[in-house]
Image (cartoon, rainbow, N blue to C red):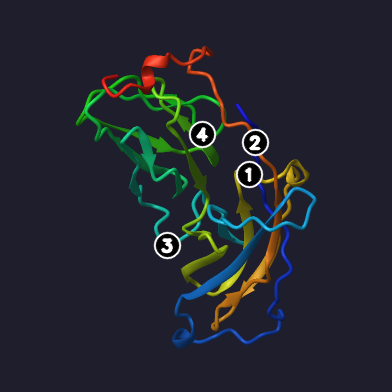
Amino acid sequence: MPTRLLIALSLWVFFVPRSFAIPGDADRTPVAVTADIKLIEGNSRTRVKDASDVVMWLVPEQSTGEISGGHSQMKRRYRMLQHDKTFEPNLLVVPLGSVVDFPNLDPWFHNVFSLYQGKRFDLGLYQAGAEKQVVFDRPGPSFLFCNIHPQMMAVILAVNSDFFGISDRAGHILISGVPIGRYVIHLWYEKASSEFNDSFARIVDIGPAGTTLPIVTIPVIKRDSSHKDKYGYDYDPKGTTPAY
């Protein structure tokens, strides 16, 4: 199982002076926060063309609850499909405490398990048309697999915030509906290099006009995606046949 890294990157941001005037109600409309991600191969300056799947989330500095945002008292529901022997989507970000449904849309049995870090669980085998659920009440990434089909891999990242976004192929991130205020910025990328193993955090003030963050550069390395089944053994070759 390759090592995955949870990163809280330090960012250079524009700070609103502590002496700025408190806006009136008319200026408290939630705003947008945007950022751009640049991925480079290791210590080189070669840019990776696909900069998707970098996650950014904002945690209010004065937050005291497990989930930061306007819906912290609600259990959100999300879905990760099992379809064509894949998980859809292969990256899902959810607020801490959310329920994720796992419907089996294939005509054969599937299993969902996560035994490495994050939320650990094993849903066992279940048939076509069935559906099971998991509450993601542990922060961080959970790496998901199927015990029959080795090609089925996905990540569910549980964050302590309602304000998060995922980068597109060009590296653009948009987080909409952010109330003005002071936040701690966090980033996570599955293929980040080991030099980002330490966690850092920086505070940013989000004003009435929103905020555009400077470009963030992340070195990445190739990782071995091979893995064992939930018992620690190699997968049955029959798992790649349509009838199984």
Q: Nearer the viewer, mark 2 or mark 3?
A: 2
Label 2 or label 1, whichever comes before in sequence order: 1
Alpha carbon distance from label 1 to label 4: 13 Å
Q: Is 181 displayed left or right of 100 in the figure?
A: right
Alpha carbon distance from label 3 to label 4: 28 Å
Q: Nearer the viewer, mark 2 or mark 1?
A: 2
Mark 1, residue position: 191
Between residue 49 and residue 209, name the one nearer to us. 49
Badge 2: residue crowd in 10 Å (few <14, some 14–19, many ≥20):
some
Label 1 or label 4, whichever comes before in sequence order: 4
Q: Residue at x 49, y 85 (%)?
A: 27
Badge 1: residue crowd in 10 Å (few <14, some 14–19, many ≥20):
some
Q: Which mark is residue 144?
A: none
What quarter of the picture does the N terminus occupy? top right
- Kind of residue at disc 1: Lys
Farthest left residue in view: 129
Mark 4, residue position: 143
Q: Is 129 displayed left or right of 201 in the figure?
A: left
Between residue 83 and residue 237, name the one nearer to us. 237
- Kind of residue at disc 2: Arg
